[in-house]
Amino acid sequence: MIRPSKPILVRLLVAVAIVYFGFVGTMWWAMHQPPETFGRVMARMPVPAVFLLAPFETMWTHARAGDLRMGDPAPDFALMKLDKSERIQLSSLTAKQPVVLVFGSYT
């Protein structure tokens, strides 16, 4: 049986490490981008590799943590109405009256 020489194994391990850290680095970068960019990057990722090879949950938690505290105003955002008639911006609503945001699943 032929044993591979140490320099070949070292080169192979270095190559694997470079590919791995490149993959994780790309994921880290994508997680810090707007949702549209993140979605485009993740659509091209091999799904099992994302969850098996990278510490996805830990990276996601750190990337999307934010620095809001209880009592802070909600970040401003704009969304289309369901009938697509106009865009509503949170700051335009809070100027008139308090707004309660409820996020959940009603299934």
Image: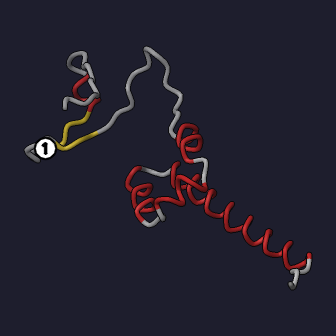
Tell me the quadrant of the picture where the N terminus can be found: bottom right
Residue at the right extreme, as displayed = 6
Which residue lies at the image location 14% right of the left edge and 41% below the top edge? 81
11, above or below 69, in the image: below
Could you say whether the residue bearing mark 1 is in a helix, strand or loop?
Answer: loop
Give residue 34's position: percent from left, percent from top. 43, 50
Left or right side of 18 for 93: left
Q: Is residue 22 left or right of residue 102?
A: right
* Amino acid tagged 1: Glu
In percent of the image, x 49 and y 25: which residue is there?
68
Q: Position of residue 105 (x, y in %)?
A: 25, 30
Q: Is residue 13 above or below residue 53?
A: below
The residue identified by callout 1 is: 86
**Identity of the residue drawn at 50% across and 39% down:** 64
Which residue does the image show at 60% across and 53% down from the upper left?
A: 54
Q: How many marks?
A: 1
Say left or right for 16 vs 85.
Answer: right
Quarter the C terminus occupies: top left
Neighbor class of circle 1 (other Cα within 10 Å; few <14, some 14-19, many 20+) is few
Tell me where residue 79 sits by quadrant. top left
Residue 18 vs residue 97, the one in the foreground: 18
Viewer-proximal residue among 52 and 77: 52
Question: Residue 11: x and y, percent?
Answer: 83, 75
45 sits to left or right of 52: left
Which color scheme did the rendering employ for the protein?
secondary structure
Q: Indicate the position of residue 89 as horizontal and vertical percent values.
A: 25, 35
- Nearer to us in this view, 91 or 7: 7
Residue 106 sits above or below residue 3 on the image: above
> Does residue 16 lie above or below 57 as drawn?
below
Judging depth in this view, the residue of 92 and 12 nearest the camera is 12
